[in-house]
Image: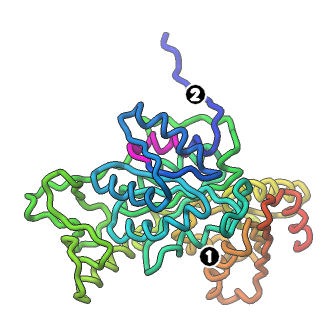
Amino acid sequence: MSKKKTSKMVLMQGNEAIARGALAAGLNFFAGYPITPSTEIAEILSVELPKNNGSFIQMEDEIASISAIIGASLAGAKTMTATSGPGFSLMQEGIGFAKMTETPCVVVNVMRGGPSTGLPTKPSQADIMQSRWGSHGDNPAIVLYPNSVLESYELAIRAINLAEKYRTCVVLLSDEVLGHMREAITLPDLSKVKIVQRIKPNVPPEWYKHYPDKQKYRTPVASYGEGYRFHVTGLAHDSYGYPTNKSSEVGVMMERLKKKITHHVDDLIQLESFMMEDAKIALFSAGIISRAAKEAVVLARRHGIKVGLLRPLTIWPFPEEAIRKYFANIKTIIVPELNQGQLILQLKRSLQDISDHRHRNIIPMQKNNGLLINPEEIFKKIKEVR
């Protein structure tokens, strides 16, 4: 009689989960610079990548790090870097270049207190807007944010898959507490997890277009050294990658960058709805604070208060349609977050054209002093506004 195969439970740190999830997705190149509180990701990958025929390189700074992963991706590698705070700011021009050149890569930002050097060992959620708007110009954004060690593993896989699928730079947000906490988790069976690989061109080199005019998100993409000739530049470019000022060609390029996101929102959006079916009051929260929010919902329910939680795992593109659906009949929404009001700003924008929005009570609950918001504080706020 054969023994039934069981999944292995492991004790894992959040940063370790990101590193191991990325490896499971096929990561084979990492370039980075040590910075609290993300350094464990680099430390683990410096050991594990060489074991798996991958490459790890410690760069001289974050500008060099983002540049290195773009270059390695153009050569065919699955690439990632990890940083925090000031390092994420330094990477913004490179992130914009990766999006403009449609080069798959992943940037992990384990958020900490800021601005500037700020609070390196304390959590923050103040980079939510920067993760969308940090790079100049109109540019697409896919930004994910887990709230557990298991989700850190799963969304690391998803981030690399989405980067490869949509040929763009994907940002994976975490935070100091989530990155350093440890949980006992059961890792998924990787034989059942889809890993996205790049489609290779099957046309003669002289027919190859690195930026095809059609708006499909999955297009064949050649890598350097494979015999295909193409040009890569941050300038506006034509379908072969060569700089152009022609409005018709620039328009096609900009529409392609936009539509790969806007036309595939259903594929990109992930949400958790917790006890929203009969809720009279709703919480809207993400990342580490959503754990406290969920516990506050449980506390409120024990006291007979009908409260629910809506949690975005995909921060960008922002889940506007889902928010409108779930909050259509909710008059009171509490938004706990570790910043001065970033999720709440986007939430208000999403609901502002609903006819009765002026009668809706959207309540901020914010900290940016390095401390977490705990369940009891959220429960107290629920009792105040019920």
- Side of 117 relative to 164 (left or right): right
Question: What label does residue 178 carry, if any?
Answer: none
Q: Would you say residue 27 sits in the magenta stretch? A: yes
Secondary element type, mark 1: helix
Q: CA distance from mark 1 to mark 2?
A: 40 Å
Identify whether 233 is placed above or below 296. below
Q: Nearer the viewer, residue 74 or 154?
A: 74
Seen in the picture, residue 309 relative to 135 is either above or below; the reply is above
The x and y percentages for residue 54 are 37, 39
Assess disc 1: are there few (<14), some (14-19) or many (≥20) residues with their C-alpha within 10 Å of its C-alpha.
some
Is residue 23 visible in the rendered structure shown here? yes
Name the image quarter holding the C terminus.
Answer: bottom right
Which residue bears the numbered disc 2?
8
Q: Is residue 166 left or right of residue 275?
A: left
Question: Tag 1: residue type?
Answer: Arg
- Give the labeled residue for mark 1: 324
Q: Image quadrant of residue 287? A: bottom right
- The number of numbered badges drawn on the structure is 2
Q: Secondary structure at mark 2?
A: loop
- Residue at 8 percent of width and 63 percent of height: 206
**Magenta-highlighted residues:** 18-30
Q: Is residue 74 left or right of residue 181?
A: left
Do labels 1 and 2 touch, CB within 8 Å?
no
Mark nearest the camera among 1 and 2 is: 2
Dot 2 alpha-carbon crowd within 10 angstroms: few under 14, some 14 to 19, many 20 or more: few
